[in-house]
Image (cartoon, rainbow, N blue to C red):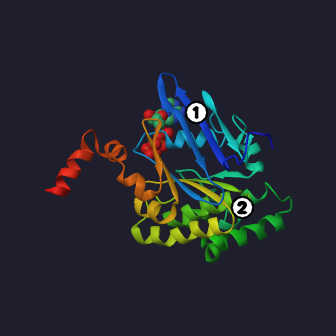
């Protein structure tokens, strides 16, 4: 731990900028994630959310800025180093090892902490139960439904025993009842002591799950607050619906 002042946030993102050539994908983003929370990162398509995740998880180096985990500067560290420190992420495009079973797919993540195959398979069973895949353990991953694959993606990350889990659109492509079924899984992850930062477009889930939400638009954090606060903020309405939208909506509700 380095001394960065009193009570640093669990995850602190400070002035992170990421350029791809002339494109400013993330522009001076600063936000905190409190320990033990489920925090949301939302914003329109192309806002820079996935790029920001990639910077936090070590898949991209920021052009400038800093990321700190429990007060320690982790900027630019490699994904495997960060995984060892307890940071895991899921990917928007789920790519399990199709020829392996669900059990074996999850065990791959467990090898970060355990050396023996039997121990890794044990972790896999435990984690599968946590995400609701216990009755699918012996199926090939390729046989899972879309919702099953999303659960598997979460399970593979959980098997690395993270303290911070980054979920990249785990609810995308699911129908409303599948979304309702996964909400308690995410709540259970938090209840087990893991801090969650999630990119999500499904607002119903964000409202149900997140205590704090940061809104990214054109690379900038334009609003932070509770879900109710951010959906009511004029700058957030405008980012999603276009310039002047907040006023137009207000006119419509008063008409
Ligand atoms: N490796 C890259 N090289 C060049 N441009 C990139 C790269 N990755 C992302 N971008 C660009 O950066 C911007 C932000 O993209 P990003 O995928 O982070 O947004 P997002 O908020 O996650 O979008 P979505 O909700 O659609 O997934 C986009 O204009 C995108 O085209």
**Identity of the residue drawn at 79% across and 64% down:** 120
Which labelled disc corresponds to residue 159?
2
Assign a secondary structure to mark 1.
strand
Give residue 205's position: percent from left, percent from top.
45, 63
Q: How far apart are marks 1 and 2 (CA)?
A: 31 Å
Which labelled disc corresponds to residue 138?
none
Which labelled disc corresponds to residue 15?
1
Does residue 127 sit above or below 11 in this rendering?
below
Assign a secondary structure to mark 2.
loop
**Identity of the residue drawn at 52% across and 55% down:** 212
Residue in the foreground of this view, choosing between 228 and 101: 228
Q: Report the side of 142 relative to 78 (left or right).
A: left
Give residue 201's position: percent from left, percent from top.
43, 54
Q: Residues within 10 Å of mark 1 (few under 14, many from 20)?
A: some
Does residue 92 sit above or below 217 in this rendering?
below
Instruction: Report if residue 145 is visible in the image.
Output: no
Instruction: Report if residue 204 is visible in the image.
Output: yes
Q: In which quarter of the image is the N terminus?
A: top right
Q: Number of callouts in the render?
A: 2
Chain-order first, disc 1 or disc 2: 1
């Amino acid at each position: 731990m380095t001394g960065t002042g009193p009570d640093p946030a669990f995850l602190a993102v400070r002035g992170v900028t990421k350029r791809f050539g002339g494109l400013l994908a993330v522009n001076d983003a600063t936000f905190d994630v409190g320990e033990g929370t489920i925090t949301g990162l939302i914003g329109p398509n192309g806002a820079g959310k996935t790029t920001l995740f990639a910077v936090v998880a070590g898949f991209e180096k920021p052009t400038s800025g800093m990321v700190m985990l429990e007060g320690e500067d982790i900027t630019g560290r490699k994904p495997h180093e960060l995984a060892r420190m307890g940071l895991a992420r899921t990917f928007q495009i789920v790519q399990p090892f199709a020829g392996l079973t669900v059990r074996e797919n999850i065990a791959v993540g467990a090898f970060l902490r355990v050396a023996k195959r039997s121990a890794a398979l044990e972790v896999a069973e435990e984690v599968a139960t946590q995400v609701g895949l216990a009755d699918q353990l012996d199926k090939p991953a390729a046989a899972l439904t879309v919702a099953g694959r999303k659960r598997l993606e979460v399970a593979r990350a959980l098997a690395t025993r993270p303290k911070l889990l980054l979920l990249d659109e785990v609810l995308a492509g699911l129908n409303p009842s599948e979304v309702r079924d996964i909400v308690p899984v995410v709540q259970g992850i938090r209840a087990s002591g893991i801090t969650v930062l999630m990119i999500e477009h499904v607002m119903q889930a964000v409202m149900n799950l997140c205590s704090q939400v940061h809104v990214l638009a054109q690379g900038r954090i334009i609003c932070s607050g509770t879900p109710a606060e951010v959906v009511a903020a004029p700058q957030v309405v405008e980012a999603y619906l276009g310039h002047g939208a907040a006023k137009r909506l207000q006119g419509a509700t008063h008409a």
